Structures are given as C-alpha cells and as structure tokens.
Amino acid sequence: MRMHWEDLPAATREAVAARTGPIYRAATADKGLNSEIAATLETRAGRIFVKGLSCDHPRVWTQQRETAINPHVAPLAPRLLWTINDGTWNLLGFEYLDGHPADYSPRSDDLPLVAEAIITLSGVRAPVGIVLKQIEQRFADYLDSPDDAELLRGETLLHTDWTPDNVLIVDNAARVVDWAWPTRGAAWIDAACWVVWLIAAGHTPSDAEQWAAKTPAWSPAPARALDVFATAQQRLWAGIAADAPDVEWKQALAAAAGQWATYRRP
C-alpha cells in the first residue's frame, strides 16, 4: 500500500522543505506501482512531484538509475530538480507535469503524439558510463535460443513500459515518466512494446502495427525479430497474468500479447 506524505519521518519532510520552501499541501498519487511514496506537493516554489523508496528497499537502486538517466531523456521526461538521501529515504523531486494519461483507443488524438515521443526516444543512444540491463537479458527466460537474443540486441535507450499512466499529454505533446527500468536494445523495441498496449486498448494487431510503423525504427526491424519479440511478450504477460488471476488489466495485457503473437505466426 502506498504511503502518504504525512507518513514520512518529520526529518525527511523537513529536508524536502529545505529544497522547496514551505509545503502547503500534498496529494498522494493514485497511479504507478514502483514507488512507496509518490505525491504532488504544493510549495512556495510551485508544484513538484516527489517519488521515493526507503533506503532499505530492495529496488532502491532504481532511484539511482533514474537519477543517472534523467539528463539523457529530459525534456521528453520531466526534469529532475533534486535528490535527497537522508539514510532512511531516497527521494526524487521532479518538475510537475499538468497533463492527462494518454488515450490509446482507436482514433484518439493522442496517438500521433505518442508516436512522436517514441520516434524521439528511438534516436537516443544508451549513454556510456551508466550500467543498463540489455533487453535480451531482461527477456532471456522468454526466448528460445541465443540467436533469438541477438535479434533484440542494440544500443538504443529504451523505456519499455508504455502503460498510458507513464505517458502524459502536456501542451499537445507526449511526455514519458517513470524511468526506473531504462534498458539497452534495438531501436524498434519501444514501438513493439506499445503494440501490446494498443491491442489492449481496442486496436486490431494489424492496426496496432500500423501505428508502430509510423516510427522510422520499425521498418528496418527484421520480421523474424518482431516474431520473436511478440512470442516473448506473450510468454511474459502470460506469466504475469497467471500470478494475478483477479487483476483485470494484467489479464487484458496477456490477452493482447496473445493476439499479437498469434497474428505474427506464419
């Protein structure tokens, strides 16, 4: 269960106020799964979004990774304003984005904006000096052979988690949030991850791929690579859904990934 701002130790809250000035109110975020604390703060400096994990959390390293990656993905991502590590809590303070989660449904006006964001990101090379998981490592359990893994390899910086809650439409542009799991891989993979979410939102596999094809990285992708990745996505989401039979959105994503894998089979 997500904590509220008031649940943080007083010393931690005071450390934040030292960066922001007085904090007038805090609203706990109702989206996202990766942070123990996530809140919008109304401060003398304006609105700020804060997310964080306790320093003894097993995934606290994702905070450090997001800090390191931010200069390479802003302004597509919100700018990181400050970090706090007081030995108890690790917090990141970001510029506040006043927008709405992207609508992936067919004929949505948000779709071209999301495609533009994926185009922008597909041109960003994975930075040197930051240790990133490779996509073929992350999907190793869902691939059949080393040759399949080689098809996913690349030097592009990937986001990979294209849930609409991670894509905010702000001032007629798509901004991408939650960079806890940046990954290195082939440039077409983010578009391929988007395909599954589009199918879950009501697109046919063919229509979803047509949207992915609006990104220049899609066309050069070998058909075999797309086939392998679709099957890997099916296996990934089937496992996630099996562990959460009562979670509707996970079941929907598993069904969507299955539709795409079936569509791509000869």
Image: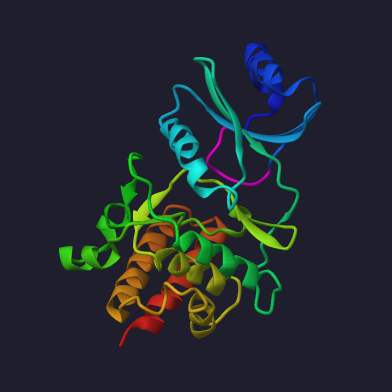
In the orientation shown, which residue stands out farthest toward the bottom?
266
The tally of labels here is 0
User: Residue 208's x, y, as percent?
Assistant: 52, 78
Closest to the observer: 3 or 128? 128
**Quarter of the figure that contains the N terminus:** top right
- Could you tell me if residue 57 is visible in this image? yes
Specify whether residue 32 is painted magenta.
yes
The residue lying at 42 percent from left, 75 percent from top is 218
**Residue 102 left/right relative to 229:** right
What residue do we see at 67% from left, 66% from top?
A: 103
Rendered view: 187 above or below 124 = below
Please state, as top left, top right, bottom left or bottom right, where the C terminus lies in the image.
bottom left
> Looking at the picture, does residue 265 appear above or below residue 253?
below
Q: Which quadrant holds residue 104?
A: bottom right
Occupied quadrant, residue 124: bottom left
**Front position in the image: 42 or 19:** 19
Answer with the quarter of the image where residue 2 lies.
Answer: top right
Across and down, in percent, residue 30 comes to: 68, 44
Does residue 107 appear to the left or right of 182 in the view shown?
right
Q: How is the image coloured?
A: rainbow
Magenta segment range? 30-36
Name the residue furthest left: 146
Magenta stretch, main secondary structure, is loop
Q: Position of residue 26 (x, y in %)?
A: 76, 30
For this rendering, which residue is in front, 64 or 73? Answer: 73
Which residue is at a point 26% across and 56% down the rendered structure image?
A: 141
Q: Position of residue 91 (x, y in %)?
A: 57, 27
The stretch drawn in magenta includes residue 199: no
